[in-house]
């Protein structure tokens, strides 16, 4: 996915991230989404797709549960964004686990400088 780098897309991505995080905290009651932290939103060049990255504690099974919960809540989250944001069209939400922090904390042996 080629991401957009304009000021507008960066501001929009930040706004989407903030609103989604608020909705997860205040409105979503799915137990699979407890302790899920949204880490970023990247929009593609035409602003039609928003890749939302998240982290969650636990192992691989917990990540899968969180991803399933986010996928199930996708329609609810988009309709909540539509109510909160004044936009002609909302981007399609896609979710992916963010491995960046885990890679930094648990550095893999082949990635360290010798």
Image (cartoon, grey):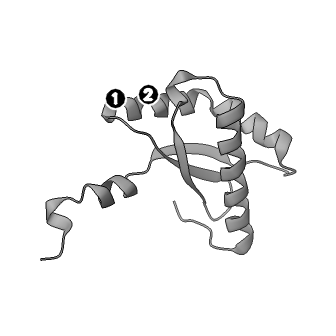
Residue holding disc 2? 65
Residue holding disc 1? 61
Please give the name of the residue rendered at 38% of the width and 57% of the height, measured from the top-left corner: 100
Q: Quadrant of residue 92?
A: top right
Is 55 above or below relative to 101?
above
Please give the name of the residue rendered at 14% of the width and 61% of the height, measured from the top-left corner: 109
* Left or right for 71, reference 114: right
Q: Quadrant of residue 112?
A: bottom left
Kind of element beneath mark 2: helix
* CB under 8 Å between discs 2 and 1: yes
Quadrant occupied by the C terminus? bottom left
Is 90 above or below relative to 64?
below
Is 9 above or below relative to 81?
below
Kind of element beneath mark 1: helix
How many numbered marks are there? 2
Where does residue 14 sit, x and y in percent of width and height?
68, 59
Where does residue 98 sit, x and y in percent of width and height?
43, 51
* Left or right for 57, reference 16: left
């Amino acid at each position: 996915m080629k991401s957009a780098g304009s000021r507008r897309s960066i501001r929009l991505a930040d706004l989407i991230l903030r609103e989604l995080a608020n909705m997860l905290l205040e409105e979503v009651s799915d137990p699979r989404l407890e302790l899920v932290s949204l880490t970023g939103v990247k929009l593609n060049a035409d602003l039609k797709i928003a890749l939302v990255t998240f982290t969650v504690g636990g192992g691989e099974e917990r990540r899968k549960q969180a991803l399933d919960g986010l996928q199930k809540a996708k329609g609810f989250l988009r309709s909540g964004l539509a109510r909160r944001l004044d936009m002609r069209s909302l981007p399609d939400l896609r979710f992916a686990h963010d491995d960046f922090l885990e890679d930094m904390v648990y550095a893999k042996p082949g990635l360290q400088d010798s």
